[in-house]
């Protein structure tokens, strides 16, 4: 827990500074909104409102409040960056990544099993497999260049290095049709939320529900790209 | 989009707020009277005035999706007051990390098989780099960050530190 030493006698917490009020010793915000992180409270206040956050924190046990504040701060940040989709946009992206990784992994394992079955087959056959995969990968790269028009950025999600192998040679089946903007992908997800009723808000349930939604969408051969319209 | 006729029945928002549902009510198209819980949750978590401001900042064609996502987040937060929908995000992040590792391992195995068969494997670094850098740029652009990974939940839940195999919960 951030041990904020923002005693009212020294420095008000970020919340009280923002609200321009005296930071009392028992201020509910003080432990979680240190004065050196003004943006954190500003975002939370803008999206949720101070009174809503107060009520929410008061309903929690003290040991739960730090996590609650951090998750609220994250949600607020995501909502301000993306006022339409907020955190749901992140969930959508992650599910898209997960689906692609599953497909890539499935293909990789399929190729691996071919190697394992080939065993002592002549090297020319395996060379042929690799050459075909290389050609497919080159075709995929061409498609990426054609349909992705993003610029900027370079680091990977979760730290750069780990993402470099995401689009490996077994990505050859990937196809981003030009008329499938990202908004449609999010809308697929949103319709799924509305259709699943009230039982899919735990993480595992959400994942299963959303994956089946995307698998249904992908079954007819359509894929939704990550790039926005 | 709901077509709540304000002349017959007030929308769920105005019913909740006990006010007259006027023809230009901003909530009416998105909070039909037959879904009272939707607005109740949104009101509890975000507050009516915050939602009004947010919707007013959006174009009309964006509002339905915005309300749907707000409703989703609100319901998730009502069900899980500590983590809300962020629990789904951290779960998915860990799944992605796990699958990425499996994929890396599978690729390593493939390279091993290729070298065992004494095949001079073509360098696949080019397509991979192009694909991964485009992917990362797409994520960056999507989230409006200057670097990829800005959407990662930066606060590892205090109760998960011992359970998270990756040890970080997706720290940036």
Image: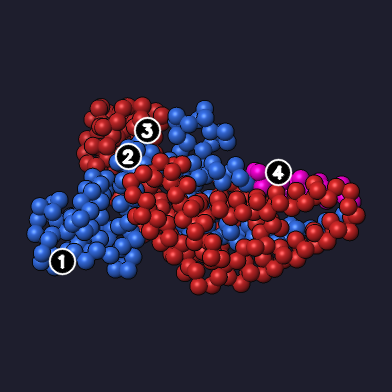
Chain colours: A red, B blue
Query: Which residues make up the magenta segment?
Result: B101-118
Q: Residues within 10 Å of mark 4 (few under 14, many from 20)?
A: some
Residue B35, image x and y in percent? 23, 53
Residue shown at 63%/69% (left/top)? A143
Is residue B103 one of those drawn in magenta? yes
Q: Which chain hosts label 3?
A: A
Nearer the camera: disc 4 or disc 1: 1
> Where on the picture, by quarter, is residue A60?
top left
Residue B120, image x and y in percent? 87, 56
* Front-lying residue, B165 or B153: B165
Element class at badge 1: loop
Indicate whether A38 appears above or below A132.
above
Element class at badge 3: helix
Mark 1 = which residue? B5
Left or right: A222 as drawn, with respect to A4: right
Residue A38, image x and y in percent? 35, 43
Element class at badge 4: helix
Mark 3 = which residue? A66
Residue shown at 62%/46% (left/top)? B100
Q: Earlier in the sequence, mark 2 or mark 1?
A: 1
Left or right: A207 as drawn, with respect to B110: left
Q: Which chain hosts label 1?
A: B
Mark 4 = which residue? B105
* Front-lying residue, A27 or B50: B50
Which disc number belongs to residue B79? 2
Residue shown at 25%/32% (left/top)? A58
Q: Residues within 10 Å of mark 3 (few under 14, many from 20)?
A: many
Q: Main secondary structure of the magenta part?
A: helix
């Amino acid at each position: 827990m951030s041990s904020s030493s923002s005693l009212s006698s020294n420095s008000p917490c970020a919340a009280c500074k923002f609200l321009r009020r005296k930071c009392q010793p028992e201020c509910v915000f003080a432990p979680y909104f240190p004065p050196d992180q003004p943006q954190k409270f500003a975002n939370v206040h803008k999206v949720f409102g101070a009174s809503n956050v107060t009520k929410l924190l008061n309903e929690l046990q003290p040991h739960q409040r730090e996590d609650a504040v951090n998750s609220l701060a994250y949600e607020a940040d995501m909502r301000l960056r993306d006022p339409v989709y907020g955190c749901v946009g992140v969930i959508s992206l992650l599910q898209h990544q997960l689906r692609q990784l599953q497909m890539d992994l499935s293909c990789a394992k399929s190729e691996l099993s071919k190697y394992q079955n080939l065993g002592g087959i002549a090297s020319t056959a395996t060379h042929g497999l690799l050459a075909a995969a290389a050609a497919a990968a080159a075709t995929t790269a061409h498609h990426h260049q054609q349909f992705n028009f993003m610029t900027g950025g370079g680091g990977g999600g979760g730290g750069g290095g780990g993402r470099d192998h995401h689009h490996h040679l077994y990505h050859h089946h990937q196809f981003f049709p030009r008329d499938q903007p990202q908004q449609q992908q999010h809308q697929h997800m949103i319709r799924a939320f509305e259709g699943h009723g009230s039982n899919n808000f735990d993480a595992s349930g959400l994942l299963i529900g959303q994956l089946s939604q995307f698998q249904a969408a992908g079954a007819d051969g359509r894929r939704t790209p990550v790039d926005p319209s | 989009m709901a077509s709540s006729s304000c002349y017959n029945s007030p929308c769920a928002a105005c019913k909740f707020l006990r006010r007259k549902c006027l023809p230009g009510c901003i909530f009416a198209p998105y909070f039909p009277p037959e879904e009272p819980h939707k607005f109740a949750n949104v009101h509890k978590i975000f507050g009516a005035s915050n939602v009004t401001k947010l919707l007013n900042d959006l174009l009309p064609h964006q509002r339905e999706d915005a309300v749907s996502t707000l409703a989703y987040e609100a319901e998730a937060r009502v069900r899980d007051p500590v983590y809300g929908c962020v629990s789904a995000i951290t779960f998915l992040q860990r799944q992605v990390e796990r699958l990425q590792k499996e994929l890396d391992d599978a690729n390593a195995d493939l390279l091993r098989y290729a070298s065992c068969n004494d095949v001079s494997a073509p360098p696949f670094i080019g397509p991979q780099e192009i694909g991964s850098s485009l992917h990362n740029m797409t994520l960056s652009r999507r989230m409006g960050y200057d670097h990829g990974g800005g959407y990662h939940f930066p606060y590892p839940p205090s109760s998960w530190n011992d359970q998270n195999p990756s040890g970080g919960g997706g720290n940036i």
